Amino acid sequence: MRLNHFFLPECAFKVPGRVYARLIEWNRSEYALFDAVDADWFDGENASSLGPLTSGRWLSLSTGAPVYAIEINSRLGEDLAALEWLDFWSGRLPTWLELQIFEDEHGPANLYGNINGPAVRVRFSQAGITPHVLSSLKRVTDLSPYAKSGDELREALPADSVERVFVLDVGQGAANALVTKSKKVLAYIDLGAGVLADTGTWPAAMTGICLKDDPVVVLTHWHYDHFHAANKFTTALNRTWIAPFQRIGPGPQSAMASSIAQNGNLLIWNGKGILKKGAIELERCTGSTGNFNRSGIAVWVNGPNHQDDPILLPGDAGYSDIPSLKRSVRSITSLVVSHHGGRAPGKAPAKPNLSTARAAMSFGNKNSYKHPLAPSIAKLQKAGWLIGFPKPVQDDRRTEDRGLKGLGTIDLRWSGSAIGSYPCNCGCSIEPTQ
């Protein structure tokens, strides 16, 4: 299987002179992330004798495209160069940019030519993209050709009952396995890993994920830390993926979408409301469409006893971005805390009066975002959860807390769930340790 060099374990790269970049994450004075492609390479392909780039040509070219991630992270004020740049551009940073790159150890940004690092410190000058080039960039990154109807998406979801939810320890990222009573992995909700500055949070003990029963993958949104485990265990790319329609960038995001489309089956949901089949309900989030975290898919997982409330997997969405949660028409049994314990607008769901209730946090120790953040912990505590800070107490579990097996995978279940070990002969290491 051919992967873009950006996703390979080790790959040297040359700092590009120019890139075309799309802003894919932005948090005022804290953080900005650009998804980028080499501008000279793109212009050359766009002007080739084969004619302007089309989505079909891009599909075949993207695995060889020179792509990059450019990160400006103030680390909550500790990186002064990044903080000054972010403060200067606060509130007026365009979505699409042409950046001229200069290596500079005192610059504000880290340039990644590989998702596992290391980064090159850079500064850059920025300019607008010409209308002709911008039109081409938007055309080749458009996910519309993969959009499917609600009926087609529902048909792709499994119908089996779910007995347990495993919140996998993937470092500073997100991956959740839905497991049946017969110990079959039915689906993954996200399949991420620690990336960029947080690649070191990936646990060495995670030697494989369980793919033997052909699970479907639901991607909550297109951020790298929610899909990169599939590039570590590449047969995951052969599966059916259900993902939200979002305006992705021309770099690693586009390369990942093309990799799934070429090797597996990419199904894009461009609708609203809820899609339900079996134990799984997908709910489209209604935050700003320009914000990947807040405009993706939240997942409700119903247990074996239909009288029990579901387990909520919100991805990185704010609690106020999930319509049925915002309207307070649903209660929960447990939840995976939004955004790794980072910023999540809205009121956290109330803790139920259940011995099985857990607030699970998927994050890596000493991550570059300093998750979980104290305001997020306080929000959970206000909702009735007994959450420790900085160490966990009764109601919370954290994937950073690795036991004897070197993994912090969390077991979430309902009152009537069958419990016990997860024996598997496929070589995976997804069995919960807490």
Image (cartoon, rainbow, N blue to C red):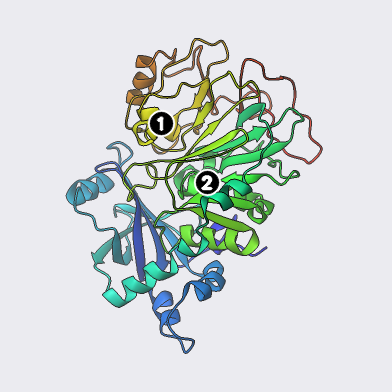
Q: Give the labeled residue for mark 2.
A: 219
Instruction: Name the spot of residue 408 as percent of width and height, x first.
Output: 60, 27
Q: Percent position (x, y) of residue 189?
A: 56, 40
Name the residue type under label 2.
Answer: Leu
Which element carries disc 2, helix, strand or loop? loop
Q: Residue furthest right?
A: 425
Q: Is residue 210 above or below residue 256?
A: above
Residue type (three-letter) at the residue carrying disc 1: Ser
| Residue 58 visible somewhere in the drawing | yes
User: Residue reaching furthest front?
Assistant: 151
Residue visible at 69% across and 30% down in the picture = 431
Q: Earlier in the sequence, mark 2 or mark 1?
A: 2
- Work out whether residue 370 can be spotted: no
Q: Which residue is mark 1?
A: 324
Which quadrant of the rendered structure holds the N terminus?
A: bottom right
Residue at image coords 50%, 25%: 335
Query: Which residue corresponds to the image point at 24% horizontal and 48% vertical from the top-left?
Result: 86
Residue 380, above or below 261: above
Nearer mark to the viewer, of 2 and 1: 1
> In this view of the protein, which residue sits in the foreground, 13 or 210?
210
Q: Nearer the viewer, residue 9 or 2?
A: 2
